[in-house]
Amino acid sequence: MTTNEMYSLTVNGEHRDVRDSWIGESLLYVLRERLGLMGSKGACEQGECGSCTVLLDGEAICSCLVLSASAVDCDIRTIEGMSPLGTPSDVQQAFVEEGAVQCGFCTPGLVVAVHHLLEHNPDPAPLEVKEALSGNICRCTGYGRIFAAVEKVVEVRKANGAGR
Amino acid sequence: MSTKTTTQRDVLGTSALRPDGIAKTQGDFAFSSDYTAENMLWGATLRSPHPYARIVSIDLSEAWKINGVETILLASDVPGKLTYGLISSDQPVFATDVVRYQGEPVAAVAADHPETCRRALAAIRVVYEVMSPLSTIEQALDPSTPPIHPEGNVFRHQRIKSGNPDIVGDVVVEGTYEIGMQDQAFLGLESALAYPDPGGEGVELVVATQWLHEDQKQIADCLGLPREKVRLTLGGVGGAFGAREDISLQVHTCLLALRTGRPVKMQYSREESFFGHVHRHPGVIHLRHHATRDGRIVKIEGTMKLDGGAYASTSSAVLTNGVTHLQGPYKCENALIDSWVVRSNNPPCGAMRGFGVVQACFAHEGQMDKLASALGLSPVEIRLINAMETGDKLLTGQPVDSVAPVARCIRETDAIPLPPPLDVTPGSLALPGGSGRTTDPGHVKRGVGWGVSIKNLMYSDGFDDTAEARCTLSNGVATVKFATAEVGQGFVILAQQIARSVLGVDTVVLDTIDTKIGSAGSTSASRQTWMSGGAVDGACRRVRERLFEHIAHQHGLDPHQLDIEDTDIVDTMGPLRVPVAQASAGLTIEETFLHRHRATEELDENGQGNCHVAFAFVAHRAVVDVDTELGLVKVVQVATAQDVGRVLNPLALLGQLEGGIAQGLGLAVMEEIVVDNGIVRNPSFTDYLLPTALDAPDVVAIPIEEYEPLSPLGAKGVGEPPCISVTPAIVAAIRDATGRDLSRTPVRPQDICGV
Amino acid sequence: MGDVVTVHRPQSLAEAVAVAADHPGAHLLAGGTDTMVEVNFSKFKPEDVIALRQISELRSFSVGADAVRIGSGLPYKAMETGEIADIFPALAQAARTVGSPQIRAAGTLGGNLGTCSPAGDGLPVLAALDATVHLVSRAGERTVPVAEFMVGVKKNSRQPGEIISAVTLPRTRGYQGYSKVGVRNAMVISVASACFVHDRKSSSVRLALGAVGPTVIRCRDAESWLAAQVDLSKALTRHDVTDAITAEFSRRASSEAKPITDHRSTADYRRHAVGVLASRLLRRAAS
C-alpha cells in the first residue's frame, strides 16, 4: 500500500482528504495548513516543546514528528476534538479558572496532555503530574497554575464520581 | 486565592478571568501564526552563515529558475531607509556589503510553499570573504581594534561618580561576576502576514509584536511610505519577554507583499528564531564594596561591561539601566563605576525582561553575601542593615520617592517557612537529576540563598513615552480601545476590570488592538499597568464625568456628589440611584485619554540625573538540593515577597511571579546561548534548555501592598522583578550547599564539581 | 511541488521486507522521533519511505525462559512498566529517560539502533545485556551482537534492504541499573550515561557507557578487574564491595571513556561523571 500525493486521515472522528500536498509534510503541518485545524501549535519542530501534542491511536505524541502520510488508518484526536460541541471541557474550564493560561501558545498541547493523563491516571500524585507534563514547555506561567488546574479537575471529577 | 463567585463583580482587586482564556484552551485564539489569506505566498529569509564577512557577490539566477518562486529581494530593493533601529538606525534591512553576525539577513524570497522557499534560499549563491570576527568585550574596547561598523565598536560608556570616591571602608570585598547570554525563547514563533494595498500605496500587517507604533514608524521609513499608509494589527502574541521589541520580520514581510502584490506570510522556525531576535546581554561585572565594621556600605567601585553584539538595538539603554541599579536596593552615597556596552560580531543583544538589571543584580547580590561573610553577618542581616527606604538616594543623585518597602520584603520572605527536609526514596523524581536516576538521597546537600532587587518601572533617561486609550459607553456596555500589546501578561483582563470599577458596567468589550488609535508604548519595562492602565482609567473617568454631568443635569444635582456603587449611579447626598445601564441608555459617550508619566532627565557624564520614573522592590529566597559530586541541582522552593503597590488581580499576579521565577531559574542553572567565535552552538530546544514541569520549584509568594501614590491605580508593574533577584538567590543557595565560590551564571555541573 | 515521494505502509513484516528489497535505498520510519527532526530541519528529504508503524509483529514482545525478544517497533513507553520492566529494570529506567512522555509513546529500540547515536538512551542497556539484533531481508534473517552492530557515530552494520525486526535480550540474574546525566530534570540529551548489570549466572558484571565515545563503550577492563576482586556468582554485598574496590572500579571506567568537549559539556566533566555513575551503580548493586 503506497501513499502518493493524495491520502485521507481520520481526524476527530471524521475522514479528511489531504490533497496536493508534499509527502514530507508532518502531521502538524497537514493539520494546520491543509485541514485548517489551527489549534495545534508548532514551537520547535523537534518534539522538544509539546505544543503540537495530539492523540494518535490514543497515545499523546508530538504531531510535528509524525510523517502525515504514515498516519493513514490512525485515529487522530486534536485539541479541536477535546470540546467537540464547542462547550469547553472540564480541563479547559479549569485552566482558565486557575490562571493556567497566559499567552496560551502551549495551552492546546497541555490540554491534550492533561486529558490523556487523567484518562489513564485519574488521581495522579504531584510528581506523576509533573512527569506526565514534562514534555510540555510553558514559558509564561512557571507551571504553578497549571498544576493547580490539574488538581482542580481531579477534585471535581472525584466529587462528581462520588456523587453518583 | 480568590476565585470568581457568581455574586462578585470582576472589578479591580478580584481574580477576574481572561476574556481570551476559553478560546486559548480550545485552540480557537488566533495567534499571528494562525492567520492565513487567499492567494497567499510564503516568505523566507536568507541569512549569513558567517559572523563577519564581506559580501563579494550574490547570484540569484538559479533561485529564479525554481518553479513557484515569485520574487527575491536584496538590499537594493529597499525603497526607503536601508537601516532601522530602536535607538540608532544602524541595522540593515538586508546586508549590503558586509555581514556582521551569524544570521544577518541577506535576502528574502516569496514563493508558493515553505518548501519552495527553502529550495530557493538554498539556490541563492552568495560569495563571502570571511573575516576574523570581533568576539570579545576586551577586543571591542581596545582602541587599536578596527571598527566593525562606521559608528564604532562602543555603543555607550557611562560613568557613575557620586559623593566621595576616595572614601575607604573598614572592610572591602571584591568579586568578578559573569553572566551568560539568555534567550527570551517565547513559544509563539515570529510570524506576520502582510496584505498589500492595490497599487502598492500602502500595506496592512498582522504581526505579533510588543510595540505597534514603533514598528509602524520603522517599517514606514524602510518602505518609503507615509506612516498612516502602514496599518498594523496585533496578531495574537505567544509571549515576548523583550524579544519582540526590535524589528525582526516586519519589513521583510511588507516588502515581499508590496513587490508581489499578494499577501505574504512569514514564519520563523525555532532555529531561525534564535537568529532572528535579540538576546539578553552577556557581560562581566567587577565590583568592590567598601563597608563599615557594622556592615553599612560606604562605597561601591567597579566596572560593568556588556556585549551588545552586532547592532545597537537598545544596548545603550540597557547599559544605563544596569549601571544605575548596581548599588541594588541599598543605601550608598559614594561610588566610582565605569560601564561600557560594546559592539561585536556576536549575536545582537537588546531587551529581555529585566533590561540590564538582571546582570547588575547578580553582581551586587554576590557582593552582599561576600560582605556578610567577611563581617560574620547572615545574608538577611547584611541586607536589612543596608535596606533602602523611601527618600534615599540612588548613586545617580535621584531620590527614590516611590514607596520602598525593602526591609519588609526581606522580613516577610524570611518569615515564609522553609520546605521540609528532603525525604524521598531512591529513584524519586524529586531528587536532583530527576528521571535520570543519577542521585540517591545520601548524595544531596541542601542550600539556602538570598537575592533582593530594585527595578525601575517605565522607560528612563529622557526617553519619555505616553499611552493612549479610548473608552466608549453606550447602553450599559463599555468598549475600550488601546494599542497595548497583550503578550500573555493579562493587560486585557486589567482593562476590563478598570472599566467595570470606574463605570459600574459588567460588560466590557475590547476593540481590536491596532494602530487606529495612538501609541500605548511598548509592553516592556513593567510599564503597561501604570501607563496603559492609567490611560484606560483616565478615559473611563472622563466618560464617567460626562455621564455624571448628564445625570446631574437631569436631576438638578451637582455632578460632584455623584458616585458609582456596584452597577448604579448614586447620589452621595440624597436618595437617587440609577443603574448605569439605564442612565446610559440611548447615549454614546466617548473619551480618549493620553497618560503621561513625569519627565525624566538624561544622565550627565558622571551618571547624575533623575533618570528613572519609579521603582519596585522584591526579595527572593531559594532553597536548592545539590548533588555535589555530579553538580546537578534541583530548585526546591522559591519564597518571595514583592512590592506591588496594590493587588489588582491576585491570580494574574501569581502567574507573573511564578513565570518570572521560572525564567530566573533558567538563567541560574540551565539557559545559555553558547557562542564560540561568533557562531551559535545551540540554536534549538534540544540544547537551549528551558525549565520543564519537573524543574519548577514550589513557589510561595507574598504581595506587599503599600499603595504607590505616584501610580494612577496605586499599583506598580510586576512583570520584571520576579525574574531578577531569583537568579542570584539560586546561585547563592548553590554556593551555600557546596562551599564553592561560584561567580558565573548559569552555573554548570562542572562549575559545581570543580572539574 | 516537485519531487515525487512515496510512503509505503506495509501491513506485515513480510510485506515490509518485500518493499525494502524492491527499494533498497528507502528510509525506514518507525516512531519518527529522529527522522522527522531531520525532515523538519531540511537536513533530509525523504523520497522513498517505508512506514513501519502499523506492523503489529514489530510492536510485540515475547518472554522466554532465557531471553526476551522485543520487537523493534515497540514504543519505549511499553518498556517503562509491566513485564519487560520487571525482567529488565535497567531497560525500564532507560526508557523512562527518553525524551518526554510524547517521545516515549513513539520512539523505539529499532529507531535508537537505526540512528545509532552514542547518546541513544536504550543502547547502553542493550550493550550491557549483550543483546542480539535481528535483521530481516529477502535473503532471510541474520543476527548480529549489538556490539558489532553499533559501528560508529550514527553508523551501524545494517545493509540496504534489511529491516531491524527485533532485539533479543538475554535474561540475567542479579542487579541491573541505569543512570543518565543531564542538566535539566527531564527531557535531556544525555551528557553521560551508564548501565550496570550484574549476572550471577555467568559470574559477570557489565558496564556500558553512553555519550562518551563514538559509540557505546563496554568497560571490559573494569569488568574483568572487578570479576577478579569479587565473587560474582553470589549477590554483592558492602562487605565485598569495599570503598577501595568501588573507587578503583570507577577509576577504570573513567579511563575507558573517550569523551569529547562540545557545547553540551566538557570531556573532563563527562569522564568524571561516568566514574561517579559507575561507582554509584556498583554501590546500588551491593546494597
Image (tube, coloured by chain):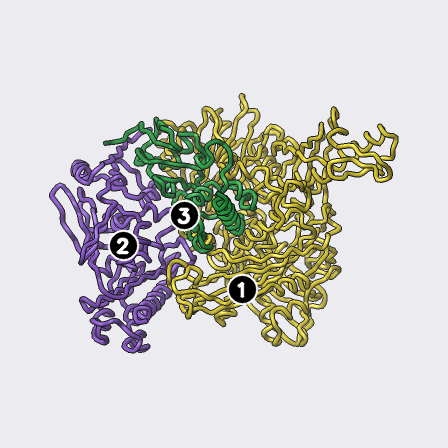
Chain C: give its colour.
purple
Q: Secondary structure at mark 1?
A: loop
Residue position marked by numbered label 2 in the rendering: C84
Residue C38, by quadrant, is top left
Picture mark count: 3
Mark 1 and mark 3, same subunit?
A: no
Residue position marked by numbered label 3 in the rendering: A48
Residue position marked by numbered label 1 in the rendering: B419
Residue drawn where x is 31% and y is 58% of the image: C211
For the residue marked with disc 1, what is the amino acid?
Answer: Pro
Rounded to the nearest whole Å, what is the CA distance between mark 3 and mark 2? Answer: 27 Å
Mark 3 and mark 2, same subunit?
A: no
Rounded to the nearest whole Å, what is the CA distance between mark 1 and mark 2? Answer: 37 Å
Percent coordinates x, y for residue C16 in the rendering:
20, 39
For the residue marked with disc 2, what is the amino acid?
Answer: Ile
| Left or right: residue B626 compared with residue C130 | right
Residue B187 seen anywhere in this rendered image of the structure: no
Which chain has been coloured green in this picture?
A
Chain B: give its colour.
yellow
Percent coordinates x, y for residue C221 in the rendering:
22, 69
Front-lying residue, B175 or C156: C156
Mark 1 and mark 2, same subunit?
A: no
- Closest to the camera, between mark 1 and mark 3, is 1
Front-lying residue, B457 or B612: B457
Percent coordinates x, y for residue B187 in the rendering:
48, 44
Mark 2 is surrounded, within 10 Å at the Cα level, by few (under 14), some (14 to 19) or many (20 or more) other residues, namely some
Q: Secondary structure at mark 2?
A: helix
Q: Secondary structure at mark 3?
A: loop
